[in-house]
Image (cartoon, rainbow, N blue to C red):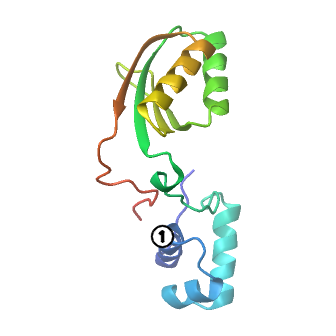
């Protein structure tokens, strides 16, 4: 469901996407509203589910997870049992930081974070033990040209 947002809501969201730790006072100053008006708007955005959560973005390289891998999957079967196994594996494998069901030739694309190619191989072996997959291919990210969580407002 789409919500109608005004320019002040957009300004609040733009600034919180860049720094969710902004105090209400600092946010009020940059969006040119009172502290109370900003607080009410932020609460309304949270209650509407527009602001889903506030998180800290961690530098993957600095914590030893510098290898990002896109894993393309063709399903082993298109049946509820297979789908439940696959969803369960995706939920419990912490290396998977994104999972997407796709249209076209691929069924799923996973975004995976690991320390090394050897760690990716261990991840791969664990995944195929958990769920039968018809075809898996992986592409290793060589350079992040743009990688953001900020939505265009």
Q: Is residue 101 visible?
A: no
Q: Nearer the viewer, residue 142 or 81?
A: 142
- Secondary structure under tag 1 reads helix
Q: Is residue 143 above or below residue 74?
A: below
Residue at position x 49%, y 51% in the image: 60
**Disc 1 designates what residue?**
18
Q: Is residue 41 above or below residue 106?
A: below
| Quadrant housing residue 89 | top right
Q: Position of residue 56 (x, y in %)?
A: 59, 62
Q: Nearer the viewer, residue 76 or 32?
A: 76
Residue at position x 55%, y 14% in the image: 128
Q: Is residue 103 above or below residue 39?
A: above
Q: Position of residue 106 (x, y in %)?
A: 39, 21
Residue 3 horizontal side relative to residue 145, left or right: right
Q: Nearer the viewer, residue 135 or 1?
A: 135
Residue at position x 68%, y 69% in the image: 44
Q: Is residue 147 visible?
A: yes
Q: Is residue 92 above or below residue 75?
A: below
Q: How many circles with numbers are drawn on the protein?
A: 1
- Mark 1 surroundings within 10 Å by alpha-carbon count, few (fewer than 14), some (14 through 19), many (20 or more): few
Which image quarter is the C terminus in?
bottom left
Residue at position x 63%, y 66% in the image: 45
Q: Position of residue 14 (x, y in %)?
A: 47, 71
| Quadrant housing residue 136 | top left
Q: Position of residue 100 (x, y in %)?
A: 49, 33
């Amino acid at each position: 469901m789409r919500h109608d947002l005004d320019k002040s809501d957009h300004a609040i969201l733009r600034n919180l996407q860049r720094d969710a730790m902004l105090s209400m006072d600092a946010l009020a100053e940059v969006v040119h509203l009172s502290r109370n008006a900003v607080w009410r708007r932020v609460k309304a955005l949270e209650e509407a589910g527009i602001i889903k959560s506030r998180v800290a973005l961690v530098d993957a390289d600095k914590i030893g997870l510098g290898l990002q891998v896109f894993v393309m999957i063709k399903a082993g079967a298109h049946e509820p049992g297979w789908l439940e196994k696959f969803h369960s594996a995706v939920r419990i494998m912490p290396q998977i930081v994104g999972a997407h069901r796709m249209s076209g030739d691929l069924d799923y694309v996973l975004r995976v974070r690991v320390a090394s190619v050897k760690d990716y191989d261990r991840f791969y072996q664990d995944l195929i033990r958990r769920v039968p997959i018809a075809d898996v291919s992986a592409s290793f990210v060589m350079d992040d040209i743009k990688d953001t969580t900020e939505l265009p407002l």
